[in-house]
Amino acid sequence: MNRFLSALAAAARWLLPQLSFSSHHVTPALRRLLLASAMLAAAITLVGQPAVAQAWDNSHWTANWGAAPAGPPPDASLYAFNNQTLRLIVQSSVGGNRVRIRLSNELGSTPLRIGAARIGLRAQGSDLAPGTDRALTFGGRAGVTIPAGAPALSDPVELNLPPLASVAVSLYLPGAVPAATVHVQARQTGYVSPSGDHTASASLPVQRTITAWPFLTALEVDGVNGAIVVLGDALTDGTRSTMDANRRWTDVLVRRLQTGRDAAARPAVINRGIASNRLLGDDPAKPLAGRSALARFERDVLATSGVRQLVLMIGIEDIGHSSAANPVTLDDLVAGYRQLIARARAARIAVIGGTLAPFEGAALHSDEKETLRQAVNAWIRSSGEFDAVFDADRVLRDPARPSRLLPAYDSGYHLHPNDRGYQALGEAMPLTLPRR
């Protein structure tokens, strides 16, 4: 386009003096003909010239795995690293041939320096599958410094990533690095090396293990299948499910989608649950419970590549922590749900409302809170404001005592399911969800 405009301007500069003759030399018709001829000549000069390649990435990126960051942690819960390499393990949803990662320093107060990063398929433990290791870059550089409050995307790399693959992301952290941005309940073992950059080691030397995902918030693939984001609390986060087994209800749904639908119609499932997270407000005493759903919505839902559906299953912590001094009402919760529905629909995201599971027997339960839970569930089911309803309450409750979890599904805490409960929940979710 720039070459065309330049050629056209040059033709005009030549033509204008020719058009300055008196009207008896150049008629209006001839004037128009000359101008059109100049424009045609300018266009012809561009024919056959080589096109300049553009640097734009026209990929259709879709989140494949994700976690919601929280923090900064209190000192007693802070992971700290010093010139060490992390190898973090995640499970893919769908397959792809090109991948990239998203790192986060969004809750940090100082710049986060990543000295090197790599990705590959895991064989077992901290070992990589042969031939799958790939170096990651950031704007062509081997490392990146992420400003406080910001995320960073890696450049894409070619990697044959199967569905349900165990993926290893290795991050070298030079210097002393506090993990201010972290998803604390990974339910997955991660590995920390002794001193040095061991990102390229096929078998990472392990100094210690961790059960959190510091800094890593998304794995993305080049694809158009789209993603379902689940925004929730401990029940979505998989609290009390078996470690290193991918037994969250969202994992069950991922496996069902991979076997129950054609490959072209298999969306990824992105788990954005945080244990103890609330819909309406934050708990200053629990920074690892994350910002409220209202506060983290843009970061954890709208910023998720390829999101098309949102499953919203949150609110039980608001009810459980309601007090006489600071009561939470049905109107408060409905107003919060309506805000998220409106913000999702503005982005053409369908919203599925999840009912709140029973919690009688848990420390935070009371008869008044049970009444509020029932009122919230009645509104979710009957209001018609969601595009669909996922009735988690009916799946998990004891038919003989609906205010309690079914004993076979109760982890013993009376608030969180066990593996059987998560399995039942994942099997109950429809495989086809509404679209907008």
Image: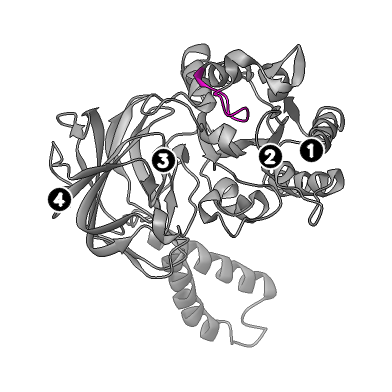
Q: Residue at x 41, y 37 (%)?
A: 222
Quadrant of the drawing holding the C terminus: top right
Kindly report the distance in space between the C-alpha atoms of the residues bearing marks 4 and 3: 29 Å
Counting from the top left corner in percent of width and height, residue 369 is at: 79, 38
Q: Is residue 435 left or right of residue 336?
A: left
| Residue to which mark 1 is pinned | 369
In terms of secondary structure, where does tag 2 sit?
loop
* Circle 1 residues within 10 Å: few <14, some 14–19, many ≥20: many
Residue 398 or residue 259, whichever sits in front? 398
| Residue to which mark 3 is pinned | 220
When the figure is inspected, residue 178 is found, relative to residue 32, above or below; the finding is: above
Read off the magenta span.
411-419
Instruction: Answer with the quarter of the image where residue 295 lies.
Output: bottom right
Kindly report the distance in space between the C-alpha atoms of the residues bearing marks 3 and 1: 40 Å
Q: Residue 373: in sight, yes or no?
A: yes
Kindly report the distance in space between the C-alpha atoms of the residues bearing marks 4 and 1: 49 Å
